[in-house]
Image (cartoon, rainbow, N blue to C red):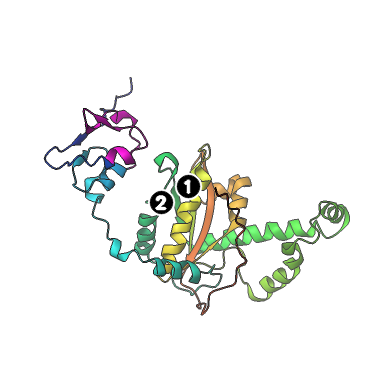
Amino acid sequence: MPEQKPPMRITRREDRCNSCMLCVRDCVSGVWRIVGGIPAPAEPDLCNLCSHCVAVCPRDAIRHDGLDANQVVRANRKNVQPKAYRDIVLSRRSVRQYRDKPVPRGVIEQILDLARYSPTASNDQNVGYIVVTDKKLIDKTAKDIFGFATRLYDKTISGVGKLIMKYAGLAENRYLKLMDYIRYEQAASSRDYILHDAPALILVHAPGTARFGCDNCNIAAANITNYAHALGLGTCFTGFLTVALRFSKKLRKRLGVPAGRKVYASLVMGYPAYSHANTVSRKKPEVTWIEK
């Protein structure tokens, strides 16, 4: 018989608690409830380890053996500056030209250590990462995807393929219209249009059966890109690789994607070859207001 786990142990320190009830108000799992006029961990087995009760308690009155107490520290809100975050978002660009300089493993670990604090549905914390810094493997992956794309393109410019593209409404697709130029430039300069000669590649994955795996991964990926930018690094989402990984078992095996997991976001990372001096133009958001 499988070994049974001991029940979750959550306690309230009476000498510290001031019965503010914030733990009850903030607990959406129904663990903390008002019992006899005081807050109590009435249903600890319902806990999903979100840590909110520990985070919200102003008196450090909660002990939870399912959490690492060493990770719980006072939040430094002095560093939370809206103007600084706005500048990070406005100045971050998708970087497609990188310096020939590796990203130290410690820096990538620092970024991923922050990414693990990204929210996940039901606090599943089911996001995983594959970090590739093997430049030969990155180059081979890019060349294989580009080669497949050009072979597929060749089938669309004549004969039956051309007719299919026309009647499917894809003849004016901007990627197809750009393909001849890209293929010429790639042959002339060996420029990598898929993974951009980046020194690092990060695949963000989750269980293929997870209902919100895609959302969880892309929230983490967004935090990775913003924090990397704040550290002086550049990143770029590489959708072509994400799509290729959906269909190619060979590619998934080559990049070490675990069985039962699905890559929902692919990012390249490195030190930008140049910076962008200005912010960019974006169209106004489409917003529908529903008000009383």
Q: In the shown orientation, is residue 125 left or right of residue 167?
A: left
Circle 2 packing at 10 Å, graded few (<14), some (14-19), many (20+), is some
Q: Distance of mark 1 from mark 2, alpha carbons?
A: 8 Å
- Badge 1 amino acid: Asn
Q: Dot 2 lies on which element?
A: loop
Mark 1 — residue? Answer: 216
Q: Which residue is at a point 50% across and 76% down the rendered structure image?
A: 273
The residue indicated by pointer 2 is: 118
Q: Is residue 111 left or right of residue 256?
A: left
* In the image: residue 97, left or right of residue 161: left
Disc 1, disc 2: CB below 8 Å?
A: yes
Across and down, in percent, residue 69 comes to: 22, 46
**Span shown in magenta:** 23-50
* Residue closest to the eye, 85 or 168: 85
Q: Residues within 10 Å of mark 1 (few under 14, many from 20)?
A: many
Residue 75, position in %: x, y? Answer: 27, 56
